[in-house]
Image (spheres, helix red, strand yellow):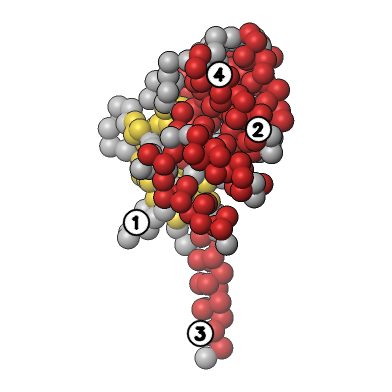
Amino acid sequence: MKKHLVLLVFLSTTFGFAQTKLVFDKRFVQCEDKWVAFKADSTGSHILGFIYIDAQAGLTLEYEGSFTIEANGKFLLKKKESQDAMKVRLKPNNVLVALIPAEKLTELGLKAVPDWLKYYKENENTVERQYRWGYMYNAWGECEKALEFLNKAYLLNPKFSGLKVELAYSYNCLQNYSKAIELLMLALKEEPITAYIVKELIYAQAKNGDVQTAEDTFNHYLPMITDTTYKAENAYNILQGYFIKKDVKNFHRWLNASDLKSDKKLLPYVERMAANLKE
């Protein structure tokens, strides 16, 4: 009985050792220029690949093959059958992958940085490249990561077209509204007025508690631009600002002055706020 117990403990320890080498806690957007493993299939095999960003295609996985983890914890590689590059375009979803530990890359016979990656790093230190990467990370909701690239771009050329508003988007996302407002006010002075700049400014002012200022911005700048893409969103952000302040008078005044009652998409949220203010 003791012998069986010792064997069971040994197997449990060994299995635990093998499994703890991989931690599946990273999303694709957190794995730029990293080797990753996907969760094992029914045979215990893990898909292996290198995630990078293609300037045109976005997040991409360079498929390398698969591997299994032996009882002693060793990673056993099964390379892809074809020698041709096998690329998979990735959507920035919530699928979780594991980073391959450095010591296991050596075991798998892989370089931490593949030789072919240099072709995707051309013009890496240009303002255009830094801006493009920041823009993509913002679109993926990785605003803190986006700032790394956008701040580098700002150091290279603070007057690069669209850079200030993209930086402001990151700061709005991270709830640093005063910094966003500072950048957007500069953008309005130095660049053509766009619907995107006005949208981010109204959002920042409303979230910062300056709701009347946000309303003034709406009334002042909206007649100057033909793009009405964000008009309803702007009106909603102002209304929500009054709601958060529990300013019943201005809430209803703005609701009547705006076109939000005719917006079927936003109306349920508007009605919910109005009902809560009555309680």
- At label 1, the amino acid type is Asp
Residue marked by disc 3: 4
Element class at badge 2? helix
Query: Which residue is labeled 4 in the image?
Result: 221
Quick one: label 4 or label 1, which is nearer the N terminus?
Answer: 1
CA separation, marks 2 and 1?
A: 56 Å
The percent position of residue 142, horizontal first and vertical second, equals 55, 36
Marks 4 and 1: which is nearer the front?
A: 4
The one of 190 and 131 positioned closer to us in this rendering: 190
Foreground mark, 2 or 1, reads 2
Q: Residue at x 43, y 35 (%)?
A: 259
Cα gap from disc 1 to disc 3, whole angstroms: 30 Å
Amino acid type at image mark 4 = Tyr
Marker disc for residue 41? 1
Residue at the location (51% across, 72% down)? 11
The answer to which image quadrant residue 151 occupies is top right
Residue 124, position in %: x, y?
A: 56, 16
Check disc 4 and report its element: helix, strand or loop.
helix
Left or right placement of residue 238 versus residue 260 in this view: right
Give residue 99's mark. none
Amino acid type, residue under disc 2 in the picture: Gln
Q: In terms of sequence position, does the residue under pointer 2 or pointer 4 come before the other?
A: 2
Say which element carries label 3.
Answer: helix
Marker count (numbered)? 4
On-image quarter of the C terminus? bottom right
Query: Within 10 Å of the Cα at label 2, are there few (<14), some (14-19), or many (20+) other Cα atoms?
Result: some
Q: Residue 4 at what x, y percent from top left?
A: 50, 84
What residue is rendered at 27% in x and 32% in y? 82
Q: CA distance from mark 3 to mark 2?
A: 75 Å
Q: Earlier in the sequence, mark 2 or mark 1?
A: 1
